[in-house]
Image (tube, helix red, strand yellow):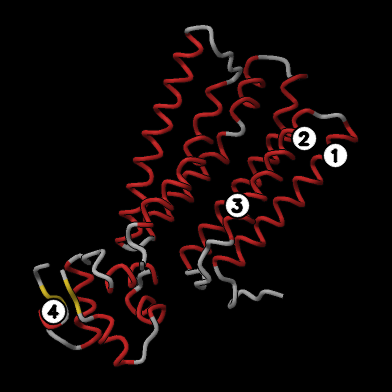
Amino acid sequence: MITRDRLNNRSFMLILGSVAISLGIALLIAAWLIDSETARYAGAVCAGTGAIWLVCARWTNTDPMRTVERRYAREFFLAIGAYMAIMLLVWPMLEYAQGTTTRTLIALSPILPVLLIGRSVMRRIRGGDELEQRTFLEAAAIAGLITGVLSMSAGFFQAAGLLELQDGLLLVFPTLFIVYGPALWWTRRRYREE
Amino acid sequence: MNNHLRALRNQQGWSQANLGEQLDVSRQTIIAIETGKYDPSLPLAFKIAQLFELPIESIFIPGR
C-alpha cells in the first residue's frame, strides 16, 4: 500500500489513472443498464482521461509530492468530482424542470464546481516557487492563444456552414485545460537537465 | 550566469530534493539553477547565500 509519506508524483498519477478508468468503466456499465447518453459520455471521458494519465505516468518524476501539490490535488479532484456528480445527477433534471428560475438554477449549477476548479488552480499558482510561476504563466499564455485560435477557427467554420457544433461554447474551457497540460510540459522542457 | 551551487550542495552532502526543501522550491528549480538554465531572483539568491553562509558573489558568477 502506498502511504502518504511515500506518495510521489508518479504513484499519484498511477492511482489517479486507475481510479478514472474504474469510474469510467462503472459509468459505461451504468449507461448500458439505464440507457443514459450522459453516463455514456461521462464514462468515455473518464476512461479516456484515465488512460492518458496512466501513459503520462511513465514520464512523471518520482519526487515526493510537496504540500502545495497535495493540496492542489485534493482541491482539484474534489471539484472535478462535484462537477461530475452535478452533471450526472442535477443537470438531467432540466428535462423535467418548469419555470425560468428553476431552469436557470439547474443550468448554472455546474458553474460552482468550475469556480472551485479555478480557485484550486489559482492557489496552486500562488503556492508555486518562482520558476514554477514562470512556467505556469508561459503555459497559460500558450494554452490561451491556442484555445483562442481553435475557437475562432471553429467559429469561422461554423459561419461558413462547414461545421455544426452543438453547445460548442461548452468546449472552450475544457480545451483550455487540455491544451495547458502539453503546454506546461513544453515550457518545463527548457529548464530540464540534459 | 554561472554558479557553484552543485559543488556547494555536494560538499554538504545534500540531495537536490533536500536543498529544494530547505529553500522551499521544487527539485526542478534546483536542477534549473545548477545547470544555469534559470537565474534565481535576488531574494532566492540571498536565501541560497544565507543557507551556505557565503557571500552571494562567491556562489553566483556573472557573465556567460
Circle nearer the viewer, 2 or 3 = 2
Residue identifier under label 4: B56
Where residue B61 sits, quadrant-wise, is: bottom left
Same chain for labels 4 and 1? Say yes or no.
no
Q: Which mark is residue A39?
A: 2
Mark identifier at residue A173: none
Residues under labels 2 and 3: Cα distance? 19 Å
Q: Position of residue A132 (x, y in %)?
A: 35, 59
CA gap between label 2 and label 4 equals 59 Å
The answer for how far apart the CA atoms under marks 2 and 1 are is 7 Å
Q: Quadrant of the N terminus of chain A?
A: bottom right
The tag earlier along the polypeptide, 1 or 3, is 1
Q: Secondary structure at mark 2?
A: helix
Residue type of the residue flagged with mark 3: Phe
Which residue position holds label 1? A30
The chain holding disc 4 is B
Q: Is residue A79 above or below residue A144?
A: below
CB-based contact (under 8 Å), mark 2 and mark 1: yes
Q: As displayed, is residue B46 above or below residue B40?
A: below
Q: Amino acid at mark 4?
A: Ile
- Contact (Cβ within 8 Å) of mark 2 with mark 3: no
At a point 39% along the width and 54% down the height, the residue shown is A125
| Sequence-earlier tag: 2 or 3 | 2
Q: How many neighbours does mark 2 have within 10 angstroms: few (below 14), some (14-19), or many (20 or more)?
A: many
Q: Amino acid at mark 1?
A: Ala
Image quadrant for the C terminus of chain A? bottom left
Residue A189 image position (x, y, % from top left): 38, 57
User: Is B59 positioned to the left or the right of A156 in the image?
Assistant: left
Asked if labels 3 and 4 share a chain, the reply is no
Residues marked 4 and 1 touching at CB (< 8 Å): no
Query: Residue at the location (25% across, 80% down)?
Result: B5
